[in-house]
Image: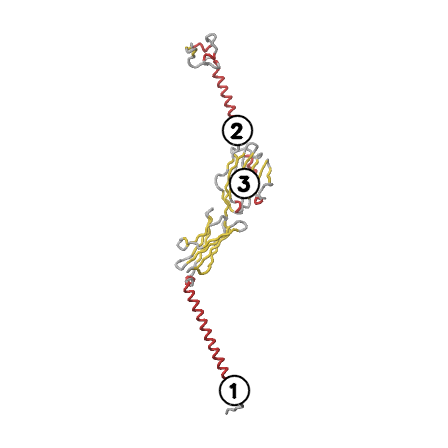
Amino acid sequence: MAGCCEGPLSFGGAPLEKNTCRGHLPPGKPLTQMGLPWGCGTPSLTRHARSLLTSLITLLLLQLGSAQLTVVGPGHPLTATVGQDVVLPCHLSPLRDAHSLEVRWIRHRLSETVHHYHNGEDLYGEQMGAYAGRTELVRDGLSAGSLDLRITGLRPSDDGQYFCTVEDADAYAEAIVDLEVSATGADPHLSLGGYEAGGVRVLCRSAGWYPLPQLLWRDARGQHLPSVSQTHSQDQEGLFEIEGAVIVIGSVEGPLTCVVRNSRIQQEWESSLHIAAPFFHNAQPWMVALSLVLVLLAVSIGLGVYLFRKQGKLAAQGWSGGRCSAGSPLGLEWG
């Protein structure tokens, strides 16, 4: 027991001799009265108790940790193109076998089930009709805690948020995955729409875009021109068609360019049109009116001349026929 006591011991306020700890204690005095709760073996017993307590706490924490679920998503939006396949990533943290867990991929509510997996089986009874035959839980990664979902043949309606949810008997967790679907349409088609407001109305149309694109006009110097109108519509597949119009006056020189841009993926198409100078001469209202008046006047004069000549011929023929018939009833003979 050498060294079991460190420092001087006291009894009733008086210091004890050094050999007191070695078994030479005052008679009739228990250890508890001397300020020693466990006797000389106290330090070793305390270390054992503390070690046992630490082990119990560690085991409890490990059990609590194993009962909790944490799901981790990609942390950034995923971008995919209409018609392609995409894999939405999601995994458990810390990694663990997910074969026995219940995994649901949903949209905004529990009733909007994209895919349902439980105890090694894919369940389709609650799946939304829009995803029928288009989803698959990637089984290869389940043993490593991966809960990835594959969606085939992307549609514009697939755009938006998805919730990766995991549940077992004791815990529930979820993570959000943002999917941004895009589609690039056809080259813009330019056409002339007639004269308007002293200029020429030019139309630009393009279809097959998602999401709704931007439509911009630029002149030959790259300056933006304001649209006088802009409309859009969606087809049955959810793709957008956009149409815009601009009034071009004679002071605009060089080609006119229509730009249709998908800002989500920073992709754009453009088409240009050069309007010849004679079109702008006809765009002035007074010139159009004057031209119309001159045409009508020319037609009127021509018609008048024709009728006048026609009437003159008829009158001459009628006078000549009247002279011959007038003498016959009287039986006059002309020498």
Between disc 1 and disc 3, the foreground one is 1
Secondary-structure class at tag 2: helix
Q: Which residue is mark 3?
A: 109
Give neighbour class at mark 2: few <14, some 14-19, many 20+ (Cα, 10 Å). few
Q: Which residue is mark 2?
A: 64
In this picture, is 56 found above or below 333? Answer: above
Q: Nearer the viewer, residue 83 or 39?
A: 39
Residue 301, percent from left and from top: 44, 73
Q: Nearer the viewer, residue 43 or 163?
A: 163
Secondary-structure class at tag 1: helix
Between disc 3 and disc 2, the foreground one is 3
Closer to the chain start, of discs 1 and 3, is: 3
Counting the numbered discs, the total is 3
Q: The disc labelled 1 sits on which kind of residue?
A: Ala
Do the CB atoms of the residues marked 1 and 3 lie less than 8 Å apart? no
Measured in 3D between alpha carbons, the distance from the residue under mark 1 to the one under mark 2, in whole angstroms, is 137 Å
Between disc 1 and disc 2, the foreground one is 1
Q: Nearer the viewer, residue 2 or 252?
A: 252
Give neighbour class at mark 1: few <14, some 14-19, many 20+ (Cα, 10 Å). few
Do the CB atoms of the residues marked 3 and 2 lie less than 8 Å apart? no
Q: Give me the disc on residue 326.
A: 1
**What's the colour scheme?**
secondary structure
Give neighbour class at mark 3: few <14, some 14-19, many 20+ (Cα, 10 Å). few
